[in-house]
Image (cartoon, rainbow, N blue to C red):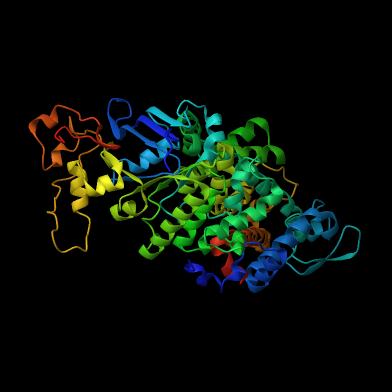
Amino acid sequence: MIDETASTTDDTQRDASIGYRDIIRALVRDPLVLVSVIFLTLLILSAIFAEIVAPMDPLIPNIFASRLPPLSYATGLDGTEQLHLLGTDALGRDMLSRLIFGARASLFVALVSVFVSGVLGTCLGVIAGYYGGWVETVVMRAVDAFMAVPSLLIALFVLFIIGGGLVNMILIFALVRWVVYARLARGITLSLRETQFVEAARAIGASNARIMLRHILPNMISPLLVLATLEIALLVLAEAGLSFLGFGLVPPEPSWGLMISRGREYMREAWWMITLPGLAIFLTTLSLNLIANWFRAVMDPVQRWRWLM
Amino acid sequence: MVDAKPLLKIENLVKHYPAPGHGLDKSRVVRAVDEVSFTLHRGETLGIVGESGCGKSTLARTLLRLVEPTSGKVLFNGEDLVGLSSKEMRARRCQLQMIFQDPFASLNPRMTVGQILSEPWVIFPDILPRAEWKERIWYLLTRVGLSADDASRYPHQFSGGQRQRIGIARALSVNPEVIVCDEPFSALDVSIQAQVINLLEDIQQQFGLSYVIIAHDLSVIRHCSDRVAVMYLGNIVEIGTWEQIYGNPLHPYTQALLSAMPEVRTKDRKERIILEGEVPSPLNPPSGCRFRTRCHRAQPDCAQNKPELRVRAQSHQCACIHIHD
């Protein structure tokens, strides 16, 4: 009876329990992900503590210091010499301060909408795929209907009626974007529902809720996570687009999207006004993608050991 | 060894699937399991053999109600499981367990072995108090030939044979009375097969289990069954003790199957019966005897009369109208 046990002696480090220490070790080993984590942490912290971190007020214009390139000095409204590390915009407001305050709006809208729409869409998708029948028909026809109309167009229309602003924007994004998660979740549920381990769970008396939560959901985390990171990038841009059209945040309020739309007019003479917020969006989504990919692998028992070894 | 009163009694169990592409036409059905009846006694092993697509796996799932039967009865200790509500059924699931064919698909890749084994205790806290979980997991793992440290590992870290042992341990974790094994050996190497068969026999003696073992490998079934049922196209065509089935097969289909079994013997080898043609579609099975289209002893009247399982000798039943003994 001593058959296959020999093969397991060399992989004791593939054990199940992983502590935060293992995660930190794995992070250090992967510098690209480490940099992304640091960047995102700094970004989120500075967005939360924007009042303390930002060198200047992002809303007060200074006509005499408009369109200054990065690393230039200007006399502020209070008469002191001030360094504009990343330059100023068309109204002389400090770019760095506006980027920091803008991160707040952009990230908040994107993260919260992705969370709300992801939870909503995944739940509906799993339920539709698991139960089938009329539940599935109703959910999936709703998905088809939402898919058939460009989501930004719906958002535009609804925001036009109920008015813009942060909360409305989050609600609208959740309303139009849940469909992508629902479609993915339903598809995966359809295949997982037929697997033998789900049958085995049913054979030991697991309830439907338990099968969905413990057996189906954990096995679709990876693709959902990848989708969610892509959606964050998409929503940062959608927020930018809607704000640009005047249906999102109201202008003096800083957001990366608004900054790009304003900077667009000065693209020739002041490159930093459009490049810097664009870079912020790019770096944020890139870091999110790298982290999500890494997180997905670390969360997957089959791939984990490669990253933790 | 065998009680007079059966532990499990299956009566006229039927499972029809709606035919693909005929959603509205309810009369077109795939007759996966048609009017199957048998009994299983305490401590007994019933082997079910038949070629691919004859409804063996559907039968296994139907009698555990993992698939809802179309009609018929599954009497477990005298109680009909088919009539129970899904809640009542869940409470009885512990008594009937299943071991699955594919050890690579039957374990959730996101759960550790310990979590897999303790899941029934989470669902039914009455089975085992939480303080005893750890010890019980260790016991189960060592009982099936794994080590106690394996509890914290994930399924992908095990080989096929080890995973099948985990599947056996999971079935044992709820103290069942009947275990239905759906092709439990077919995904394993021959050497591992023998070990798993021995393991199943050991735990059967220790825990007083009854098995329904489904397989297509006749030699495996001969090795581990007390009684054998032969299925063809959704019907049981012959059922008897293994001595009867292997020593004196009555049904032409059983005879054909046995003659196809590889043997080492060189002398007095019986003539091989080679089955002609393909298995007919269960969508549209032949009239009368379903085996008549491929039977080497078919007569014209086989098309008219549907043969019933009739007792030919002590506990030996066969469904063929041309057997007279």
> x and y percent of residue A65 in the render?
79, 60
Question: Which residue is at a point 20% across and 35% down the rendered structure image?
Answer: B290
> x and y percent of residue A199 in the render?
48, 43
Question: Which residue is at a point 14% across and 38% down the rendered structure image?
Answer: B293
The reply, left or right, for residue B306 in relation to residue A151 is left
Between residues B317 and A67, which one lies in front from this camera angle?
B317
The reply, left or right, for residue A30 in relation to residue A43 is left
Question: Which residue is at a point 53% across and 49% down the rendered structure image?
Answer: B172
> x and y percent of residue A71 in the render?
76, 69
> Is residue A184 visible to the viewer in this orientation of the structure?
no
* Image quadrant where one finds the C terminus of chain A: bottom right
A309 w.r.t. B290: above or below: below
Between residues A132 and B301, which one lies in front from this camera angle?
B301
- Looking at the rendering, which quadrant does residue B186 occupy? bottom left
> x and y percent of residue A157 in the render?
59, 34
Instruction: Give the farthest residue toward the left.
Output: B300
- Looking at the rendering, which quadrant does residue B325 occupy? top left
Between residues A68 and A127, which one lies in front from this camera angle?
A127
